Image: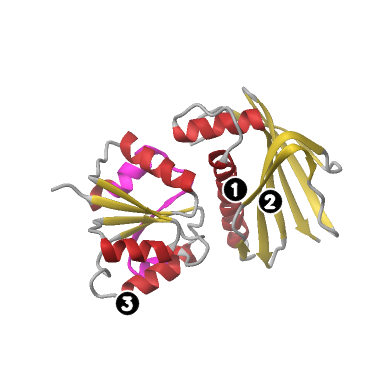
Amino acid sequence: MGKNVLLVDDSSTMRKIIGRSLRQAGIAFDNIFEAADGVEALEVLENESVDIVLSDINMPNMDGISFLREKSGRDHIKDIPVLMISTETGEDIIGEAKSLGAVGAIKKPFTPDKVNEVLGPLL
Amino acid sequence: MVMMEVSPSEIQDQEPRLHSNSISGVIGLAGKVKGVLAIHMPESIAFKITGSFLGIDVDSMNEDVEDAIGEIANMLGGNLKTILSDSGKDIDLSLPTTISGKEYDFQSLKNAEREVIIFDTDGGGFIIEIQLEA
């Protein structure tokens, strides 16, 4: 059975770019779900089978940090790994993300090789 | 991600200029340093960058182009935030916005220092502008 990924970014273009980078990196998913903010992401996680989440931090409605905090309080979805993909990769914000369960971070802009290097070992 | 050769050509402290058939991506800066960061470029370069991002041909202004240029402004803002944070000046970034049209200008903030850097690409030039409140 293949794996499913959830892409969370308020930019639909960035979601397309990440999806394209996954294909270029040779990482195949059965299903690629999309969400524009943390609220939508939680809704997808509640209703779909998702193996890993790639999430932005700076988003409207519910940002990536608030999404991690909310997710960590829901027992049935709290263990789904989240990899941050963001322009913001300072030690303070990534440290906060990791304390809330994020498994790593990729800085924008990124290359397919970088996506493969970081995401590959998590699958 | 942009997949084109880019090189800085000059730094200016010029008055705001009119932008024709262009698009601008803008990020607001708040915190210990206040101001705006903007990237201005002709539509033709914006179409080329968006096409490179998505692997498709782009020949008209649409939501993908606005989204792509807004995202570039966001990435520039993220880098600026990291640089400022490393020197003890923590800032917050706004969400990116875009402006596009046949002719518009981008006014300076009051009491702001303004730096303009012009970059060259094979397809023409683009401008990165930073305004920081003095």
Kind of residue indicated by mark 2: Leu
Marks 1 & 2 on one chain: yes
Tell me if residue A22 comes above or below residue A90 in the rendering.
Answer: above
Label 1 environment density (alpha carbons within 10 Å; few <14, some 14–19, many ≥20): many
Q: How many marks?
A: 3
Disc 2 element:
strand
Q: Which residue ends up furthest to the left in the rendered image?
A: A1
Q: Which one is in front, A33 or B133?
A: A33
Kind of residue indicated by mark 3: Gly
Label 3 environment density (alpha carbons within 10 Å; few <14, some 14–19, many ≥20): few
Host chain of mark 1: B
Q: CA distance from mark 3 to mark 2?
A: 37 Å
According to the picture, the residue beneath numbered tag 3 turns out to be A73
The answer to whether residue B59 shows anywhere in this view is yes
Host chain of mark 2: B
Marks 1 & 3 on one chain: no
- Give residue A31's position: percent from left, percent from top: 26, 47
State which quadrant residue B85 falls in: bottom right
- Residue visible at 37% across and 61% down in the picture: A41
Disc 1 element:
helix
According to the picture, the residue beneath numbered tag 2 turns out to be B37
Host chain of mark 3: A
Kind of residue indicated by mark 1: Leu
According to the picture, the residue beneath numbered tag 1 turns out to be B76
Q: Which residues are magenta?
A: A96-119
Mark seen at residue B117: none
Q: CA distance from mark 1 to mark 3?
A: 33 Å
Q: Are marks 1 and 2 in contact (CB under 8 Å)?
A: yes
- Give residue B90's position: percent from left, percent from top: 61, 66
Disc 3 element:
loop
